[in-house]
Amino acid sequence: KLQFLYFIGLNMAMLLGIAVVAAVGRPNLLFMMADQMRWDVLGENGAGTPNLDRLAKEGVKFGKAYTSTPTCTPARAGILTGQKPWNHGMLGYGDIAPKYPVEMPVTLAAAGYSTHSIGKDHFGWNSSINDGVPHGYMTTMLYDGIETEIDEYNQWFDKQMPGMTPEEGWPTLDYNSWNGAAYALNESLHPTAWTGRLAVDFLDTAKQRLPGQNWFLKVSFHRPHSPYDPPARILNNVSAADLPPIRISTDGWDAPFKGVGCGPQDPE
C-alpha cells in the first residue's frame, strides 16, 4: 500500500504541473483525492512519496483536519453535500442517495463552472442507461472498482485487451484483500494510469473544449484502496528494511480476525 502512493503521487504531480487559472481571473478548480490513504503516509514519516511531499511543501498541510466519518460512501456523501452524516443520512456504509437538496457540482454549475469528474465517484449505477449517477457533474469518466459496473474504464480495458477482464491485473487478489502483489499487466493498463492520463488530457485541452469558461475537475484515484497492486518497478524498489515494523497483538484482540485473510498472524 505504501509503495503504491508513489505511483499515485506521480500522477498527481503531472496534473499540478499544468496551469489551472483561467484568463478571466476566476480560478479553475482541480480537486484530487485518493481512496483509503492514511493522513501520515508522507515522506517525512518514512513513505516514498516525493511528489506528495512537494505538494505539502509548496502548499498548505493541515495537521489537525478531521472527517466526520472515515467510512467509504458516507465520506463521499459528505464531500458531495458538505453535510455531516447525521444530516446527509449515511451513518454507515450503504448506497448514496440518487439526489440531495444541495450538491457541490450543482452549486458550482449555478456559479458558472463547468463540472467534470474522472475516476472514482461511487455514487451508484443507473443500469437502465449503463452509466453512473452524475449528481450534477456534466461529464463523468468513471472507474469505481465495482465488478457489477461496466464503467468507462472497464469499457476502455475491454477494447485494449479483448477477452480479458481488469481483474486479471491482480489474479491473486480481490477488491478487499489484505495481501499485495505487483500488477500483472502492462502498467499503462492500470486504473491509476488511466485516471491520470484522462485528467492530464482534460487539462491540456480544456481551453479548446471550454473556451472562456471556468471549470471544476474532480480527479479521484481508486487506489491505494485494495487490491494492493502497484507496478512491479515500484514494488521492487522498496525493501523490507524500508518498511515500519509489523505490529502484532500481545493481548489477543486480533483473534476474531485470524483465518479470514487478515493480518500477519494469518496462516495464509
Image (cartoon, rainbow, N blue to C red):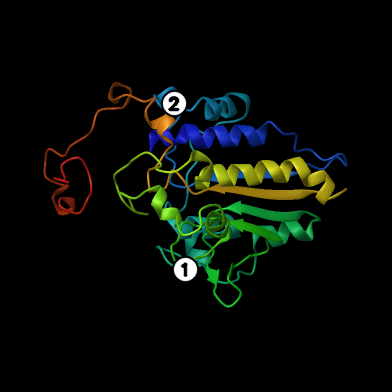
Q: Give the farthest residue toward the bottom.
A: 128
Tell me what residue is drawn at x 31 percent, y 51 percent: 177
Specify few, some or many for label 1: CA neighbours under 10 Å numbering under 14, 14-19, or 20 or more: few
Q: Which residue is mark 1?
A: 95
Q: Position of residue 119 (x, y in %)?
A: 57, 52
Of the image marks 2 and 1, the number of the one nearer the N terminus: 2
Tell me what residue is drawn at x 53 percent, y 34 percent: 9
Q: Is residue 178 shown left or right of residue 94?
A: left
Q: Position of residue 12 (x, y in %)?
A: 59, 36
- Label 2, label 1: how far apart the Cα atoms are: 34 Å
Tell me what residue is drawn at x 61 percent, y 32 percent: 13
Tell me what residue is drawn at x 15 percent, y 54 percent: 256
Q: Amino acid at mark 2?
A: Gly
Residue 188 versus residue 191: which sits nearer the camera? Answer: 188
Q: Position of residue 261 (x, y in %)?
A: 22, 50
Q: Which residue is mark 2?
A: 48
Q: Is residue 29 visible?
A: no
Q: Is residue 77 shown left or right of residue 44?
A: right
Q: Give the farthest residue toward the front.
A: 162
Q: Amino acid at mark 1?
A: Asp
Q: Is residue 220 shown left or right of residue 262?
A: right
Q: Position of residue 87 (x, y in %)?
A: 52, 65
Tag 2 secondary structure: loop
